[in-house]
Amino acid sequence: MVNKAIVASLLFGAAMAVPYPPSATNGARHPVPDHAYPHKKVNGGNYMPSRTKTTASKTSAAPAAAKDQGKRSTGETVNNPVARYDNSNITDGVGDGVDQYTLYLGDGSTGAGWPDQSRWVSFENMFNNYKDQMFSSCDWMGVPNDSGPEVGAIWDGIQAAASATGVDHRFILAVIMQESGGCVRVWTTNYGVRNPGLMQDHNGGATCNENNNVQNPCPSSTIYQMISEGTAGTNDGDGLANCINESGRSDVSAFYRAARIYNSGSISSTGNLQSNVATHCYASDIANRLTGWRNAPSACTCDSNPNSCGSVNF
Ligand SMILES: *[C@@H]1O[C@H](CO)[C@@H](O)[C@H](O)[C@H]1NC(C)=O
Ligand SMILES: *[C@@H]1O[C@H](CO)[C@@H](O)[C@H](O)[C@H]1NC(C)=O
Ligand SMILES: CC(=O)N[C@H]1CO[C@H](CO)[C@@H](O)[C@@H]1O
């Protein structure tokens, strides 16, 4: 028992060499426009590929993908050239980027106009720019906002999960903001697949809000586990690492396709990332978050008017 705990803490310590800087939780807070918070809609759940054929899947493609993939594990790693294990560089992008929304349609490639990784923001800037949302995003769910140590644990949890899996830390943060706005007490949703925690993962164990059991404070270990489950996978479904792997690409479209897979369980047979079940704007939102979008109004009409984007549910 004791040995196991020591080993676990050593492993985690090794993965988390540099704890969050004071800037991650300090500083002036600014108001956030209401539209900047995620508001899950009916059918807005996540259907990431699952270990077994399940009636929970909303797609005909997801069970096929599950059959092809064989076993799921919680120790997923990215196994293609976009893997990045050294996420200690927090000034790794273009800085703040631009807080604007560009609607991206098509297959996620730069040829189709999607942003190259050279246009992504820096992790430190991205985290600081999303802090206002993290500190206030619990409010609309009627639960207490994140505290400083809880927001700090999000930083540390991202860095640990990134080092363990090879998933770029900025991609993990983008999905956290998309799923929960960074509210550690986000509710557990179920639109066919149970989605708990900061990343609304596939039936993971970590949550600080389920069945009216709201935990305040939300323990750091639970926050780390939420991020690990969304990134490295759960016993029941894939995290971002395998979604990147399943994208079948090694250019930047691996990330945008992985976002679609995380949300829908598969890529649309059309190849267009605005199509398939769940949230049509999902992959475009993630691309915008990675280039600096935070408070500007969304220009994505694919959910409010699927025809305007040629979005289909397959
Ligand atoms: C961090 O990444 C940026 C962008 O790739 C690079 O210019 C910079 O030299 C890196 N810093 C360190 C300390 O490696
Ligand atoms: C959460 O933060 C927002 C923005 O600062 C604030 O308006 C709201 O009252 C806070 N909610 C709680 C429950 O403290
Ligand atoms: C380890 C693992 O899951 N590898 C898979 C990565 O994705 C490809 C498909 O793109 C599969 O063939 C591999 O089995």
Image (tube, rainbow, N blue to C red):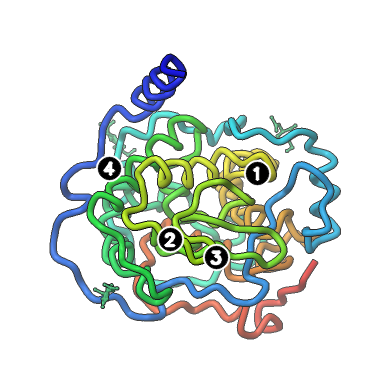
Asked whether disc 2 touches disc 3, contact meaning CB atoms under 8 Å apart, the reply is no
Give me the disc on residue 284: 3
Residue on which disc 2 sits: 177
In the picture as drawn, the residue positioned furthest to the top comes out as 3
Residue located beneath label 1 in the image: 238
- Label 1: few (<14), some or many (≥20) within 10 Å? many
The answer for how far apart the CA atoms under marks 1 and 3 are is 21 Å
Circle 4 packing at 10 Å, graded few (<14), some (14-19), many (20+), is: some
Residue 257, image x, y percentages: 63, 52
N-terminal of the pair, mark 2 or mark 1, is 2
Mark 3, secondary structure of its residue:
helix
At x 65% / y 44%, what residue is drawn?
238
**N-terminal-most mark, 4 or 3:** 4
Residues under labels 1 and 4: Cα distance?
29 Å
Examine the rendered structure and indicate whether residue 62 appears above or below residue 74: below
CA distance separating discs 2 and 1: 19 Å
Q: Quadrant of residue 42?
A: bottom right
* Category of crowding for the residue at label 3, using alpha-carbon neighbours closer than 10 angstroms: few (below 14), some (14–19), many (at least 20): many
Asked if disc 4 is less than 8 Å from ligand 1, the answer is: yes
Quadrant in which residue 69 is drawn: top right
Marks 1 and 3: which is nearer the front? Answer: 1
Counting residues from the start of the chain, the first of labels 4 and 2 encountered is 4
- Tell me which amino acid carries mark 3: Ser
Q: CA distance from mark 4 to mark 2?
A: 19 Å
| Closer mark to the observer between disc 1 and disc 4 | 1
Tag 4 residue: 91
Picture residue at 54% right of the left edge, 77% below the top:
300
Q: Earlier in the sequence, mark 1 or mark 3?
A: 1
- Residue at coordinates 48% horizontally, 30% vertically from top-left? 164
